[in-house]
Amino acid sequence: MKKLRFALSLALFTGMPLLSQSQTTDVLESPDGHLQVRLATDTEGHLSYEVNYKDLAVIRPSRLGFLLEKPHMRLQRFLVLDRQNASADTTWEPVLGEVARIRNHHNELALELQDATGSGIRVMVRFRVFDDGVGFRYEFPDQEALDHFIIKEEVTEFALAGDHKAFWIPGDYDTNEYLYNTTRLSDIAALDAVARERDIAISSPIGDNAVQTPLMLVADNGLYINVHEAALVNYSTMNLVLDKATLTFRSHLVPDAVGNKGYLQTPAHTPWRTLVISDTPEAILASKLILNLNEPSQIEDTSWIRPQKFMGVWWEMHIGKGSWDLASGNHAANTENVKKYIDFASEHGIDGVLVEGWNEGWEDWFGNWKEDVFDFVTPYPDYDLDELTAYAATKGVSLIMHHETSGSVTNYERRMDRAFQYMKAHGMHTVKTGYVGKIIPRGEHHDGQWMNNHYIRVARKAAEYQIMVEAHEPSHPTGLHRTYPNWLANEAARGNEFNNAPALGITPEHQTILPFTRLMGGPMDFTPGLFHFKLNQFVPERTTVVRTTLAKQLALYVTMYSPLQMAGDLPENYRKHPEAFRFIVDVPVNWQDTRILEAVSGEQVIIARKDKESEDWYVGGITDEQERTARITFDFLNKGQSYMATLYKDGPKAHWDHNPEAHTIETRMLRHGTPLKVTMAEGGGFAIKVKAVK
Amino acid sequence: MKKLRFALSLALFTGMPLLSQSQTTDVLESPDGHLQVRLATDTEGHLSYEVNYKDLAVIRPSRLGFLLEKPHMRLQRFLVLDRQNASADTTWEPVLGEVARIRNHHNELALELQDATGSGIRVMVRFRVFDDGVGFRYEFPDQEALDHFIIKEEVTEFALAGDHKAFWIPGDYDTNEYLYNTTRLSDIAALDAVARERDIAISSPIGDNAVQTPLMLVADNGLYINVHEAALVNYSTMNLVLDKATLTFRSHLVPDAVGNKGYLQTPAHTPWRTLVISDTPEAILASKLILNLNEPSQIEDTSWIRPQKFMGVWWEMHIGKGSWDLASGNHAANTENVKKYIDFASEHGIDGVLVEGWNEGWEDWFGNWKEDVFDFVTPYPDYDLDELTAYAATKGVSLIMHHETSGSVTNYERRMDRAFQYMKAHGMHTVKTGYVGKIIPRGEHHDGQWMNNHYIRVARKAAEYQIMVEAHEPSHPTGLHRTYPNWLANEAARGNEFNNAPALGITPEHQTILPFTRLMGGPMDFTPGLFHFKLNQFVPERTTVVRTTLAKQLALYVTMYSPLQMAGDLPENYRKHPEAFRFIVDVPVNWQDTRILEAVSGEQVIIARKDKESEDWYVGGITDEQERTARITFDFLNKGQSYMATLYKDGPKAHWDHNPEAHTIETRMLRHGTPLKVTMAEGGGFAIKVKAVK
């Protein structure tokens, strides 16, 4: 009988330390008492943690530790030397954000550990438990036994309590631009997903059971769990590899050129491993846990950091109207064309105009692993930057710089100072960087420690020049826009440009998943606002389409937070729908408050946000390929205040596939508590401007 | 019978194409007709070359070609499309050098080849035959069939005609600081040689049959052959791997982090593969073939480039008087100490003072593969650079900058502009760079394409700032000081500091081998001039010794050409021998003429050089551990001119081991043709200043 029970335990917890064997148990609770973390070491010193939420298992006992390359050893068995408890309840104000003030309320436990195998190495494991989740990290204090060290792998486990529904993209060292997959954990098949992709420039998939974070999980028992990391500084990006037998994820860091995964020197620490946990999906989106686990702004004077909207000489190249390169004979970034964008932006109060393909080198940049590719200071001869600088200034518009590195980062770093000096000499304050290509230094990956340091280096150096940055093709964001608020946004996911990708494109559900995944880490330059849906406008044989309605494109400005938003389409396409374009003109990109009204990953997202500068609210709602009816109660409006609502919604017969442009614009008065029902078409959505009047 | 002959052929030429099977034969001769190159393709299109000198075989038929990674193919079978002949006979003047004018006299043959396997790829093989050797390279012209391509290996063979005596160091991706080995080819055992070394910081040996170039070979039939390369630009360094069965070397390029060996884009070409060939050893040292195969100066205004001598706060750290780092409590690079060097240099007309350990970071720099190591602009608090700048200026001395990168080249490249600006702001015009450590980008090697490009990038950027450069721990020099004359010298071999290395040190023969090997590629900063021979001056338990006599140290200023020469020892050691130091003060570092009077690798080297600025001559002679008598006939002096010779020679009982400091100084009058007999002690030498008088 005893024997049978032992066998059962093994079957249930294969590879897991049993809490019953544990030597030490520490318990840490969230301020509201709903979340509980237990830490224990077994008889051999293996350290594990488990997480429960309202008595439901979130993370079953899961091990913590490292494989080190230098010194060459396993760092997985510990003696607990000491434990320290702490609490915090503070508020802080982000420079730009979804809300004006953020509360940081958590309890903390730090275990001081010593390697049990005799090396003398000391490690701290620090847990912070918030009402909406858990963060923990490893810290390596200054010590005699450890100075410089090399990580072979971080062995952090996330043993899940059930075969949850997961929203995932394949684990990869170089790209996060995959379409999301929705399966049970046991059905994750990452390499199949990779095989379906055809339009990603550079990918280095890890394996069939490997996924990236932010990973969104929905449990059958009604729990919502988001796994990610915060403050990814001087460390490799974490992927997760699932052991399907135990439903346990293990961390898998991105290696460097020689297979190592991290070079650290004490004192050092890892990023925070984060679990945002709730029994409502809306609370996941409302969580500020990841921001709270990042460091405050390292930029002292932030007065020059501005939220902004911009247009760009960009989409016309994607859809074949023009080209990036001059040799094509169809060069889009020419002085006259850019002036048209400046004119249109100026007419409509859009802050900036991005110009891609402005500089020499586009004839020979992609796919060749070429190091000396762009110099970032030499415009094409048909692009008169001095003239445009003066012209833009008279129109009250800023030009936005484009630094496509082609992945040749050694080249960019050599030239970055001069490139930023060149920008400032031409009155430019914002740069879009790009990393389309295999990385140089060769053997490094987009998501490795070296590149993660590079992205931060760019943000820091840009700040020296009072330049704002948004990066395309970087590693996944982890809330670093708190620490470097001039780092406004990133792409780092499948953005709107993938509508033009022939293989998979962008499915209607995609934008409802992004807030639960990619956006957990920070603002995305999704480049919304496409008003022309069949992408054969200039290339008749092209069959790609934007799989949303027009109203949904408007809604994205609200559902997808970013302090930097593009009006992605061409001026001529906006001129066909001037009333709808009005919403893009009006919608702010910086907020004093945000309410997640309804949000189900893969189905719908409805969010209300209050302008940072006024009493006006904006509401956006989007659906997947299903028609849905949104029921909004305006209980977030000020009592006693009248509001004029302008509602941009799908037309009666709108449909992402055969009638995407159909939309209607209505106005009506609203007050606190007014109910509103809005029907979203298949692949549709709505946007509402709620203007305080009188 | 026929069968037997076939078998014999195979035994003699295993793996070799037989000329008798050849389809095409081209013959190219040197201007004097002594050297002959034959090119042939066999029935399958394999291209081979052979070299003969006065009817003696130098290189037996040896294949040419490549393995490519992208496109993935062998590029070894060719159709000959065309052949072009050319000749040149010009002279040019080096900015700095051993002679005032250099004759470039050669015949040239370029074969235009097309890949015989149908790719359409075209390659040129260009041979230049001089009276003193052969150079050849591959060229990839601009073409439809090839744009960007990746080299997996260059397959260039050097099939030698006998089991020659070879002066070699082990093939290695990261160091050329080995002691030389002298064996028959068949006795090369590189890994045994590696195993004997104990004092080389970073090494990546290739294999037991792998050696580096310049490789000096002496054949039993009286031929002298030096194998090397010229103009190593945008390409990996070539090592050679011997097939002992056929006595054939094959090129082995240094790989990058992912195992590739070269990233090229058409039009492109390889470095020249060089064979300096003669029947006298002196002609090998006199050869200007490698310089002739380099491009002319790319620096237009060279008026700021100056030859120079310097002292340094450097050796005292090696021998334990002081330390590089401040935390030691014994920091050598402090203001007062540096002033003493400035005073001494100023008193003796020495141009510069190098100061190592001047900047923050030396407490934590070596062996940790640390990226953010030095910033090159932050002096230690006890080093007042502003004060020293002013002080040096009043004394007519220039401070020489030290940029130790620790191998963290990404860090250096980011900071290089500011570092050079900082130098200029402090009146410094010369920088010693250093690469002690594993390279970052991690996975790259000191001798790979990326680093070879880096060294040139430093020379070019330094030239923008009118800064002169000498690099320590770079890849082997290949004559690029012609193209970048501000790149004055390199270490790139076992220099004088290795006298203090406990395991092997520097053997007495070493300096007689260097001119035949390392120096074939260009000037070396050997840092001669050590006057104190037992290196326990400050650390009594130290057992290392300088294994030369004092007179030999003086001779090195003549036998080892460099436009940048250090007076390596401490001022207090020079003050003990002021008369001998006078030679170091007097000896020029730039010459209008050079005569190799006698030179046998591993035995002795006697060279006479004529000052660039006067009619004075300087003669240096060195021997290995054998006592030898030099017999000089001064037939290079002007007829009818009187000369006062000051002879610095070993004392009667001088000996490198037990009496190294013993020397005598004599004067005597000389005329054209005067004979002189000088005895060199074991490990000794002599130096003569021959001053034109009246």
Image (cartoon, coloured by chain):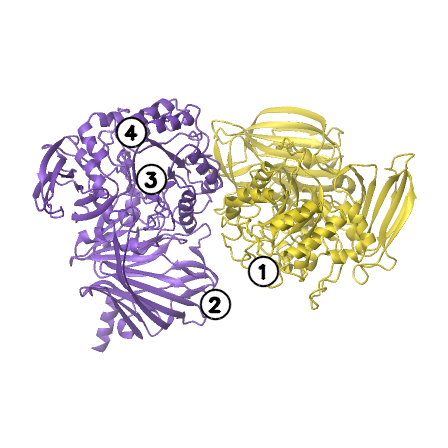
Chain colours: A purple, B yellow
The residue to which callout 1 is attached is B326
Separation of residues labelled 1 and 2 (CA atoms): 23 Å
User: Are dots 2 and 4 on a single chain?
Assistant: yes
Tell me the quarter of the picture where residue A579 sits. Answer: top left
- Work out which residue is located at the far bottom of the displayed protein and give it: A2
Image coords of residue A273 (percent x, y): 32, 58
Identify the image quadrant of the C terminus of chain A: top left
Query: Is any atom of residue B33 visible in this view?
Result: yes
Residue type pointed to by label 3:
Ile
Residue at image coords 51%, 36%: B264
Image coords of residue B195 (percent x, y): 62, 59
The residue to which callout 3 is attached is A200
Query: Is any atom of residue B171 visible in this view?
Result: no
The residue to which callout 4 is attached is A345
Tag nearer the camera, 1 or 3: 1
Separation of residues labelled 2 and 4 (CA atoms): 60 Å
